[in-house]
Image (cartoon, rainbow, N blue to C red):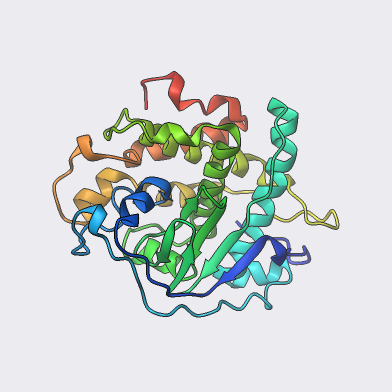
Amino acid sequence: MSFNEGAGLDVSQVVSGKGGAMVGGGIGGLILMLVIVFLGGNPLAGSGVGDPSEIFLGGSQGETVDLSECQTGADANRSDVCRIVGTVNSVQDYWRDALPADINVQYRDAKTVIFSGSTQSACGTASAATGPFYCPPEERVYIDAGFFDQLSSTYGADGGNLAQMYVVAHEYGHHVQQILGILSKAQDGRTGPQSGGVRVELMADCFAGVWAHHAATTKDAQGNTLIKPLTQSDIRSALSAAAAVGDDHIQGEVARGQVKPETWTHGSSESRQRWFLNGYESGNLNTCDTFATNKL
């Protein structure tokens, strides 16, 4: 997938994060409850951190991400940071029209914080270890500028543009769930393939697919089309990312451990791919009701 080179990017929809402030003590459990993390399972697992109530989150001092270079679609084609900006623009342009038209609900914009190293959020300290996440209290998405390298090198996605853009679209799927009052269903106190958390994550994958179906119709502020039509190669790229962040893949292949479905919080690789395709093929958010079926 590529951007039309002459399309304009709106950097007002993103923020350059900088920080490194420490959050400790009993707030740790609250962080894990509120953060809707892209990667499966506990983002702190394997880090030596014990009980959530005793977490001391921190990180190295973050660096400000330069957004001044993100002006056009050509910039989004050459730069991961600018590609995040362009994807945010496209995703929000789609949902601004789709929510009122499809279900008579008004969309409200959400900013994405692009950071390097670490930065502070209302849900605690964001760092490369957590992966991208959506923070409901402030309705913001947080993405480490270096995450996409990790998505390929550690998790095995193919590194294509739509693999990266799927991540952004998935997080904005959580924002749509927040607007619709669905996001809280993730907190049903259970884990496993049929849990509320898995259903919320698979719905966000489906919403990402719905956006992908319409991505080539989204426009910049001047009415220029942002994104060129998708190819089958683009879809394979997105599916590689969906497979890479499946709970079974992370447990068995990335962590080299035992696959334990009873602990899943995001869904299997197959389920994540299938729900993305469901959204992409239908182009309709009404096909994304993961709470209406047990065939996840």
Compared to 75, does 248 lie above or below? above
Residue 112 x %, y %: 58, 59
Residue 151 x %, y %: 39, 61
Compare residues 230 and 145 and report the one nearer the observer.
145
Compare residues 70 and 16 and report the one nearer the observer.
16
Kindly tell me whether residue 229 is visible in this rendering: no
Residue 246 x %, y %: 33, 45
Query: Looking at the figure, which quarter contains the N terminus?
Result: bottom right
Compare residues 136 and 290 and report the one nearer the observer.
136
Question: Which residue: 40% across, 67% down?
Answer: 127
Kindly tell me whether residue 217 is visible in this rendering: yes
**Toward which corner of the image does residue 85 lie, by quadrant?**
bottom right
Compared to 65, does 296 lie above or below? above
Residue closest to the far right: 222
Residue 111 x %, y %: 62, 57
**Toward which corner of the image does residue 106 lie, by quadrant?**
top right
**Toward which corner of the image does residue 154 lie, by quadrant?**
bottom left
Question: Relative to residue 272, is residue 260 drawn left or right?
Answer: left
Question: Which residue: 44% across, 46% down?
Answer: 239
